[in-house]
């Protein structure tokens, strides 16, 4: 069901969940809750220091390094326009956590205790073990809210809201509703959902079983079965189960809640097995993936879920984003969703900091956040503290066709459903 608000052009992201493994060390760090002007950590009369944490390297080779470029682009434009209430953004860049829990926590400690940042934006990693430390140290932190740590803590904000359902919360319906749009309706259509065999995958299966069923799909298969620590060399066992899951025949839709290297293997295998239905994931919106023929072939026809306005949009805000990225990179570069993650994380931080006024402290920042709302952004209409409990509920799908992406379901906002 569509939410009765304006249509823009983007999509909502998929939920990933990882258990929190944290330790805290608050020793000798100046408290960010201080209200004494220049004594506020990271704030001087003419600057605000911000840092980031990004999985630039991972064991599987998957990288989010362009998240850093997206953040730089948005901060650079803010500085070109005079800064925030007269203060320039001093962006320290992003620490690489290697998608490792220990490194994530170490990066958080370094940014707060050594770099003395006022805020962490962006934070882009499925391993957010530094969350407890940042919350305890009262560090405003911004990123893509696809892990549970973005749902509930008072100092941690998802640029698209909290995208991981919590007890008493809701599930955003942009993915199944977008696919229903592609298929001309969900009635009589079946889906098979596959995820990694870890906490994130188990949670994703629980979430999307509810989500797709509520939208009217028959969930024929839903398993968190693929090893998360190593790529399978043979996908036959998975494809056999999936392609017989709907009463002995193939489902109408294969849904992968995994990262790109896994998707390439799975999609190649199901295509070779003769699957002719719809394939979809929340990850593979990246023109750089198209430079390799095998990768391009594997992803051809795939519908990708987005948490933001597609790059194919012709809106003024998208034109501004592209110009900002080009300026920060110093040249034309292929756009990808990681750039948008960094850009919109920075954008939400800047919007709240602006409203906090000239006397910037953590207390004034949190007060501004508590009543914050705006409209017509590249992630839809934003509102806090709602966004710390549920997603903003908007999404779009793009399809890779003949080497380029096309919008297959435009950005819309949908009514969420209760999470059970």
Image (spheres, rainbow, N blue to C red):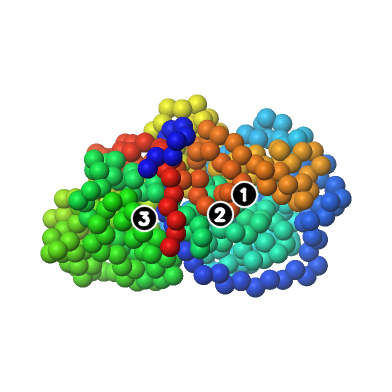
Residue 114 visible in this rendered orientation of the protein: yes
Residue nearer the viewer, 273 or 35: 35
Task: Determine crowd level at label 3: few under 14, some 14-19, many 20+ residues with C-alpha closer than 10 A.
Answer: many
Q: Quadrant of residue 29?
A: bottom right
* Residue position marked by numbered label 2 in the rendering: 389
Q: Secondary structure at mark 2?
A: loop
The location of residue 205, given as percent across then percent down, is 36, 64
* Residue position marked by numbered label 3 in the rendering: 211
Residue displayed at 72% across by 58% down: 138
Q: CA distance from mark 3 to mark 2?
A: 17 Å
The location of residue 14, given as percent across then percent down, is 42, 54
Q: Earlier in the sequence, mark 3 or mark 2?
A: 3
Q: Is residue 381 left or right of residue 90?
A: left
Q: Which mark is residue 338?
A: none
Residue 146 visible in this rendered orientation of the protein: no
User: Cβ–Cβ below 8 Å for labels 1 and 3?
Assistant: no
The location of residue 220, given as percent across then percent down, is 23, 62
Q: CA distance from mark 1 to mark 3?
A: 24 Å
User: Cβ–Cβ below 8 Å for labels 1 and 2?
Assistant: yes
Q: Earlier in the sequence, mark 1 or mark 3?
A: 3
């Amino acid at each position: 069901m569509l939410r009765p608000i304006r249509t823009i052009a983007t999509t909502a992201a998929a939920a990933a969940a990882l258990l929190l493994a944290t330790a805290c060390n608050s020793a000798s760090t100046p408290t960010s809750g201080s209200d004494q002007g220049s004594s506020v950590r990271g704030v001087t009369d003419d600057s605000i220091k911000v840092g980031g944490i990004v999985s630039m390297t991972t064991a599987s080779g998957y990288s989010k390094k362009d998240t850093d470029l997206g953040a730089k682009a948005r901060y650079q434009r803010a500085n070109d326009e005079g800064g925030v209430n007269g203060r320039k953004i001093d962006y320290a860049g992003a620490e690489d956590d290697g998608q490792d829990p220990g490194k994530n926590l170490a990066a958080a400690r370094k940014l707060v205790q050594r770099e003395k940042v006022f805020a962490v934006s962006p934070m882009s990693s499925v391993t957010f073990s530094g969350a407890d430390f940042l919350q305890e140290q009262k560090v405003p932190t911004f990123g893509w809210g696809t892990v549970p740590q973005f749902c509930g803590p008072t100092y941690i904000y998802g640029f698209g809201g909290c995208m991981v359902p919590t007890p008493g919360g809701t599930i955003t319906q942009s993915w199944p509703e977008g696919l229903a749009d592609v298929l001309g309706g969900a009635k009589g259509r079946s889906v098979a959902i596959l995820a990694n065999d870890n906490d994130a995958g188990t949670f994703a299966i629980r979430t999307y079983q509810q989500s797709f069923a509520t939208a009217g799909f028959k969930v024929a298969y839903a398993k968190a079965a693929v090893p998360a620590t190593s790529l399978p060399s043979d996908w036959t066992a998975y494809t056999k189960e999936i392609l017989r899951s709907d009463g002995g025949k193939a489902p109408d839709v294969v849904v992968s809640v995994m990262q790109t290297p896994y998707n390439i293997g799975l999609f190649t295998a199901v295509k070779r097995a003769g699957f002719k239905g719809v394939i979809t994931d929340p990850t593979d919106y990246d023109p750089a993936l198209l430079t390799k023929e095998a990768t391009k072939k594997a992803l051809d026809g795939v519908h990708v879920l987005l948490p933001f306005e597609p790059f194919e949009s012709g809106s003024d805000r998208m034109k501004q984003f592209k110009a900002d990225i080009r300026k920060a990179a110093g040249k034309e570069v292929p756009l990808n969703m990681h750039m948008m993650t960094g850009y919109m994380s920075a954008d939400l931080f800047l919007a709240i900091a602006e409203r906090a006024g000239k006397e910037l402290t953590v207390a004034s920042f949190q007060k501004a956040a508590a009543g914050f709302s705006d409209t017509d952004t590249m992630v839809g209409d934003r509102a806090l503290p709602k966004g710390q409990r549920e997603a903003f509920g908007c999404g779009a799908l793009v399809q890779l066709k003949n080497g380029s992406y096309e919008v297959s379901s435009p950005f819309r906002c949908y009514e969420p459903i209760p999470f059970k």
